[in-house]
Image (tube, rainbow, N blue to C red):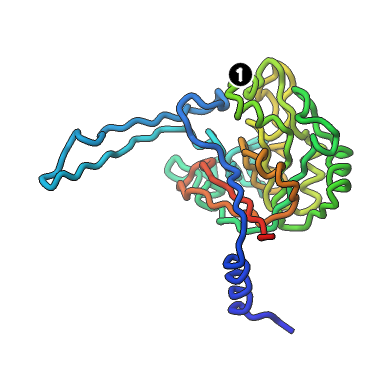
């Protein structure tokens, strides 16, 4: 029997009314927060504060000005973000993607809002450590072991989040450690990215600054996982996520919700992803 859209909607509403837990996977945006040095820093100011202008009835309003790169804080990479040999996803020439100086094709405005099955692969827990070592490359064997120990199945169209534990440095305010230029940063490499792509996932994310493994002292010199995911397979990447709270629940499957800001022609967007977990 085919389920009607109205029945499906009613079921979703019933689940929400019964109670769900929402885990915030986004980082607060603060001046001076850890970020990639390749992007303009976040800055927030108040051009008008309460009392600068007071209305005749005693009311007053404050307002803000924000400047930042689109790859600062928790953010999603659009498919226009990375090219290889002059080509973007689908073999699109980088020049053909531009229109009026912006990426009219494959820009952030083309990323559809996501309400999808989500899976977290808690790699440190599977390996018996609190967080992975600096510069550690998460192997295919690590991913398979984690999925097996969790009993997690990854389906086509899912969003897979890879926890390294490196986000603990963000919480600790250890900016240099989180950026990890000298020490390196753990993450997957090309092989791990291909393993994810082979499962037909829609998007992936991690708790690190660049998603993938950064060797000590190398910075962002090469990003093979970005090539595999964005350029070769059209899989979105979410970076600088807060995965500690979600990992602490011990729940590995959830509803993943994300909506990027539709910046026309941009290569990425700040996001506030959510993990929605059914009530007990």
Residue located 58% across and 70% down the image: 13
Q: Is residue 222 above or below residue 156?
A: above
Q: Toward the viewer: 79 or 54? A: 54
Residue receiving disc 1: 176
Lateral position of residue 148 relative to residue 38, left or right: right
Taking the view exactly as shown, the residue that stands out farthest to the front is 280
Classify the position of the C terminus by image quarter.
bottom right
Q: Is residue 247 above or below residue 30?
A: below
Measuring from the top left, give residue 18's x and y in whole percent.
61, 67
Measuring from the top left, give residue 264's x and y in whole percent.
45, 48
Measuring from the top left, give residue 235's x and y in whole percent.
68, 48
Measuring from the top left, give residue 90's x and y in whole percent.
66, 49
Lateral position of residue 47 relative to residue 92, left or right: left
Taking the view exactly as shown, the residue that stands out farthest to the left is 56
In this view of the protein, can residue 230 be seen by the observer?
no
In this view of the protein, can residue 259 be seen by the observer?
yes
Residue located 52% across and 27% down the image: 33
The image quarter in which residue 230 lies: top right
Q: Toward the viewer: 137 or 246? A: 246
């Amino acid at each position: 029997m085919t389920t009607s859209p109205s029945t499906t909607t009613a079921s979703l509403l019933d689940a929400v009314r019964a109670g769900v837990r929402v885990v915030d996977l986004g980082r607060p945006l603060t001046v001076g927060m850890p970020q990639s040095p390749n992007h303009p820093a976040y800055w927030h100011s108040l051009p008008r504060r309460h009392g600068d202008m007071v209305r005749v009835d005693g009311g007053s309003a404050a307002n803000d000005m924000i400047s930042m790169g689109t790859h600062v804080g928790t953010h999603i990479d659009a498919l226009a973000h990375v090219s290889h040999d002059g080509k973007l996803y689908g073999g699109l020439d980088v020049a053909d993607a531009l229109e009026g100086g912006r990426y009219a094709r494959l820009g952030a405005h083309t990323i559809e809002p996501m309400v999808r099955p989500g899976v977290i692969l808690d790699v440190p827990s599977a390996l018996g450590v609190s967080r992975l070592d600096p510069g550690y490359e998460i192997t295919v064997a690590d991913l398979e072991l984690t999925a097996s120990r969790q009993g997690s199945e990854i389906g086509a169209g899912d969003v897979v989040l890879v926890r390294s534990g490196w986000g603990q440095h963000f919480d600790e305010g250890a900016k240099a450690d989180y950026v990890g230029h000298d020490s390196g940063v753990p993450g997957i490499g090309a092989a791990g990215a291909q393993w994810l792509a082979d499962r037909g996932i829609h998007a992936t994310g991690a708790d690190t600054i660049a998603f993938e493994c950064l060797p000590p002292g190398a910075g962002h010199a090469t990003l093979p996982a970005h090539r595999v995911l964005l350029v070769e397979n059209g899989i979105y990447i979410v970076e600088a996520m807060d995965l500690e709270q979600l990992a602490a629940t011990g729940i590995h499957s959830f509803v993943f919700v994300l909506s990027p800001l539709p910046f026309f022609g941009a290569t990425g967007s700040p996001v506030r992803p959510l993990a929605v977990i059914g009530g007990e």
